[in-house]
Structures are given as structure tokens and as C-alpha cells.
């Protein structure tokens, strides 16, 4: 057997060995990959809010406004820092036409800018059930941010992204869901800059579903 043939055979054997060794590495992935919705901010985030440090402690009851129901858009959730109301998650309070549900997180700077708008919108429109859903595992940080903003909007606590996962929402915050009688009728994946902009979108969503 001449040298060139021997060289080809040795090269082939070495290539086969490298492929066998590489396959397990290619198939393995990060150990921290977990199923579910991974939320991210819709806009670039330079850093988390500096004056709030991660804190997994449970929030005492009675430190935030009471929620009107057991959840929102058919998803049962605990109230953030307060008691749940009596309205079922798949309904809405009497004398309200729809639920306007803002999904936010304490580390999200666009959420921080948007939440006061929802607070103002809720005061101006008692015909809507306006609530928040804090989509993060640190409820104490959510309470601290709302208090620092002077926002009275009742919010539910969602530490494992149950709300977004159940409704099939995009994995971003902030995001707003419009629901009628517990049924999702519209989703607004955007940051609202004014009460007027929010009013227009809600009106369009209700017209679109025949309300």
C-alpha cells in the first residue's frame, strides 16, 4: 500500500473520531434552559432600575390597593400586596365594559414610564376594569416601584409568567391585553406614551370585537 493511500485512511479515521467526540457537545445546551415564556423589555435596557435590588421576599397584605377579582382574562392570580376580590378571573366587575390589563415588570424602564398613564386612564374611565399584572418573581420590587411612582393601579402578581403563557402572549413587557367577560379580544404589544393613545387603542379593540 503506497503512502498516499495510507495517508487517506489515517485522515479518514481521525475525522471519524472527531465527529464522534463533537456530537455530544453539539447536542448539549445551557443547563438553565427552562420551559415557559421569557419576558424581555420591548426597548433596550441599559441596566435594571438602580434604586431597587432583587428581593424575593413575600409582600405583606394590605400594602397595595385591593384587586377587584380573582385574576384577569380567565387566569387566576394572587393580588400584589393586597387581597383578591370576589369577581371570577373569567369575568369582570359589574358596571364595567371591559378589562384593560397592563403586563409589566419592576426592571422594565418603559413600564416605569407607562404605568402612570394607566393610573390616569383608570381614574378617567371607571367604565373599564383597569389592572396590572406584575410578571416577575420579585413581588416586593414591584410594590416598591409602584409606590415610588405614586401609582395606585391594582396589580396581580405573576411570578412564573402564567398569564403570558396561558394567553400565548409575546414574551415582552410592557404589553396590554383587552378582555371582555374574561375573553381576550385584543393585544397591544407597545408602550403607550399618552392617555389619548391608550383611549384610541382600547376603543379600536372594542369596535373590532363588536362591543
Image (tube, rainbow, N blue to C red):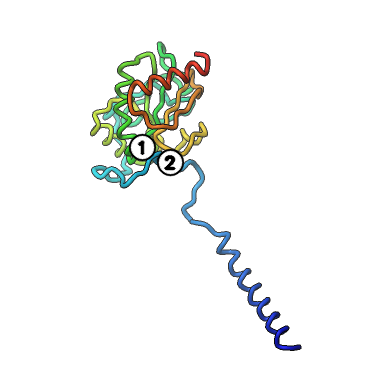
Instruction: Tell me which residue sits at (49%, 16%) in the image.
Output: 207
Helix, strand or loop under label 2: loop
Q: Tell me if residue 112 comes above or below residue 198 in the rendering.
A: below
Residue 39, label in figure? 2
Q: Tell me if residue 183 comes above or below residue 39 in the rendering.
A: above
Q: Are marks 2 and 1 in contact (CB under 8 Å)?
A: yes
The location of residue 86, given as percent across then percent down, is: 40, 19
Q: Which of the pair 121/2 is nearer the observer?
A: 2
Instruction: Tell me which residue sits at (60%, 64%) in the image.
Output: 23
Instruction: Tell me which residue sits at (46%, 19%) in the image.
Output: 204
The location of residue 18, given as percent across then percent down, is: 61, 72
The quarter of the displayed image where residue 195 is located: top left
Instruction: Tell me which residue sits at (38%, 40%) in the image.
Output: 43
Q: Residue furthest right?
A: 1
The quarter of the displayed image where residue 145 is located: top left
The location of residue 173, given as percent across then percent down, is: 40, 36
Q: Which residue is mark 1?
A: 105
Q: Tell me if residue 112 comes above or below residue 128 in the rendering.
A: below
Residue 202, label in figure? none
Helix, strand or loop under label 1: loop
Amino acid at each position: 500500500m503506497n503512502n498516499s493511500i495510507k495517508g487517506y485512511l489515517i485522515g479518514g479515521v481521525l475525522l471519524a473520531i472527531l465527529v464522534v467526540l463533537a456530537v455530544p457537545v453539539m447536542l448539549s445546551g445551557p443547563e438553565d434552559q427552562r420551559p415557559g415564556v421569557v419576558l424581555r423589555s420591548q426597548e433596550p435596557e441599559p441596566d435594571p432600575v438602580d434604586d431597587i435590588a432583587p428581593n424575593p421576599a413575600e409582600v405583606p397584605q394590605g400594602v397595595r390597593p385591593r384587586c377587584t377579582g380573582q385574576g384577569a382574562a380567565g387566569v387566576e392570580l394572587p393580588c400584589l400586596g393586597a387581597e383578591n376580590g370576589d369577581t371570577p378571573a373569567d369575568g369582570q366587575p359589574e358596571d364595567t365594559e371591559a378589562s384593560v390589563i397592563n403586563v409589566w415588570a419592576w426592571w422594565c424602564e418603559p413600564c416605569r414610564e407607562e404605568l402612570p398613564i394607566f393610573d390616569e386612564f383608570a381614574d378617567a374611565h371607571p367604565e373599564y376594569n383597569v389592572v396590572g399584572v406584575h410578571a416577575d418573581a420579585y413581588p416586593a420590587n414591584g410594590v416598591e416601584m409602584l409606590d415610588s411612582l405614586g401609582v395606585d393601579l391594582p396589580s396581580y402578581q405573576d411570578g412564573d409568567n402564567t398569564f403570558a403563557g396561558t394567553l400565548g402572549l409575546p414574551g415582552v413587557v410592557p404589553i396590554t391585553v383587552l378582555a371582555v367577560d374574561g375573553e381576550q379580544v385584543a393585544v397591544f404589544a407597545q408602550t403607550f406614551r399618552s392617555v389619548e393613545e391608550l383611549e384610541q387603542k382600547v376603543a379600536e379593540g372594542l369596535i373590532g370585537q363588536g362591543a
